[in-house]
Image (spheres, helix red, strand yellow):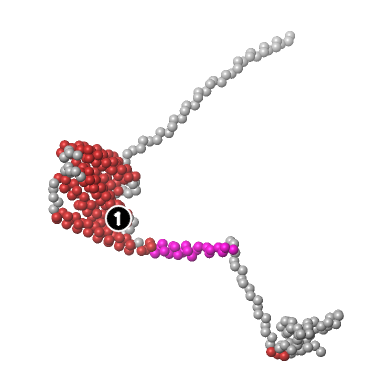
């Protein structure tokens, strides 16, 4: 009895691949929020406080010439912003620069606002406000620059130079304050006494003295560096390759040769008769010559002239 054939396999349904989800778009890298520097934060706070103070001056001072005063206030604020932006960029270069610049800018803004709102009104009010504010800005920024140069001079140098640089910087700051403060003091109808100006001039002279001593010490302590740099330049100059001749790269000029002088015949050789060569195959004798090899001159008849001095004896 034969076995029944196995049933054919059932057809399988085609497998369909499940649709894959589209890749989620990559989120852009979120950069951390940039924090404000302490210098900029304090500058903004001071600007706000001085703005409120200027509003109070509006009710205290003379309101005549309001257009000039308001316009000058906007200009002073703009100058403060520019100076703050400039000093913020240099905040990272020095540890002491930020607080000094902050105090200086606040001092400039305070004096400028006092001059703007407390100056008595007259026909030349705009001119008075302008030159006083410019004077304050130039003097204060010059003091900051002087302090920066002095303190940079004392960095990495002996302690004595650093001390003189610091003391001179303090004297420069005191001189700047003494010469700019009367600009705002006089707006309150206060007369500055003569003793004040004597003290201001004395501080300025002490600043000049400290600056001179600091420069002398800087020159003295920098002599070793100058000598080392001079030796380095000399060593570099001695190791520099020789200049190439225009004839070619590395071409050496050919030595110039001169013909060696022929030895002059000795007197004994001149007195001895020169042995003349024999006749050739045709019976002709060669032209006679001096002992040094020069041919004899020819006579009128075309024959050798044996009568000239130094001539050999005629052949026999």
Does 244 lie within the magenta span? yes
Identify the residue shown where x is 23% and y is 48%.
131
List the single residue furthest toward the top: 1
Does 67 lie within the magenta span? no
Task: Indicate the quadrant where residue 229 lies.
Answer: bottom left
List the single residue furthest toward the front: 300
What number of labels is visible?
A: 1
Q: Is residue 292 above or below residue 239?
A: below
Identify the residue shown where x is 24% and y is 45%.
130
Q: Position of residue 162 (x, y in %)?
A: 29, 57
Out of 100 and 261, give the one closest to the viewer. Answer: 261
Q: Position of residue 193 (x, y in %)?
A: 13, 53
217 sits left or right of 123 in the view: right
Q: Position of residue 18 (x, y in %)?
A: 54, 20
Q: Position of residue 172 (x, y in %)?
A: 24, 54
Q: Please indicate, yes or no, whether residue 134 appears anywhere in the rendered image.
A: yes
**Where does the magenta region start and end?**
227-247
Label 1: few (<14), some or many (≥20) within 10 Å?
A: many
Identify the residue shown where x is 27% and y is 39%.
44
Out of 222 and 283, give the one closest to the viewer. Answer: 283
List the single residue furthest toward the right: 282
Which residue was labeled with disc 1?
150
Quadrant where the N terminus sits is top right
Q: Is residue 48 above or below residue 289?
A: above
276 sits left or right of 90 in the view: right
Identify the residue shown where x is 78% and y is 86%.
275
Q: Please indicate, yes or no, whether residue 39 appears anywhere in the rendered image.
A: no
């Amino acid at each position: 009895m034969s076995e029944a054939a196995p049933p054919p396999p059932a057809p399988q349904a085609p497998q369909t691949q499940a649709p894959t989800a589209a890749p989620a778009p990559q989120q852009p890298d979120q950069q951390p929020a940039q924090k404000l520097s302490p210098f900029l934060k304090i500058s903004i706070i001071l600007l706000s406080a001085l703005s409120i103070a200027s509003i109070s001056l509006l009710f205290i001072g003379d309101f005549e010439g309001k257009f000039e005063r308001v316009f000058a206030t906007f200009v002073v604020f703009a100058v403060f912003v520019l100076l703050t932006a400039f000093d913020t960029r240099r905040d990272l270069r020095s540890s002491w620069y930020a607080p000094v610049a902050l105090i200086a800018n606040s001092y400039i803004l305070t004096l400028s606002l006092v001059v703007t709102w407390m100056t008595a009104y007259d026909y030349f009010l705009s001119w008075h406000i302008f030159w006083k504010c410019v004077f304050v800005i130039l003097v204060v920024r010059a003091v900051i620059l002087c302090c920066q140069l002095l303190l940079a001079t004392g960095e990495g140098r002996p302690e004595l130079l650093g001390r003189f640089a610091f003391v001179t910087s303090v004297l420069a700051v005191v001189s700047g304050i003494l010469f700019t403060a009367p600009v705002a003091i006089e707006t309150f109808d206060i007369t500055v006494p003569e003793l004040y100006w004597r003290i201001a001039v004395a501080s300025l002279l002490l600043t000049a003295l400290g600056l001179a001593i600091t420069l002398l010490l800087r020159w003295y302590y920098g002599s070793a560096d100058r000598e080392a740099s001079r030796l380095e330049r000399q060593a570099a100059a001695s190791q520099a390759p020789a200049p190439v001749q225009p004839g070619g790269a590395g071409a050496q000029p050919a030595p110039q040769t001169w013909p060696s002088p022929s030895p002059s015949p000795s007197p004994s050789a001149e007195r001895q008769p020169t042995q003349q060569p024999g006749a050739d195959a045709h019976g002709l004798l060669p032209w006679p010559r001096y002992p040094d090899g020069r041919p004899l001159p020819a006579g009128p008849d075309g024959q050798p002239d044996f009568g000239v001095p130094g001539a050999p004896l005629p052949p026999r």
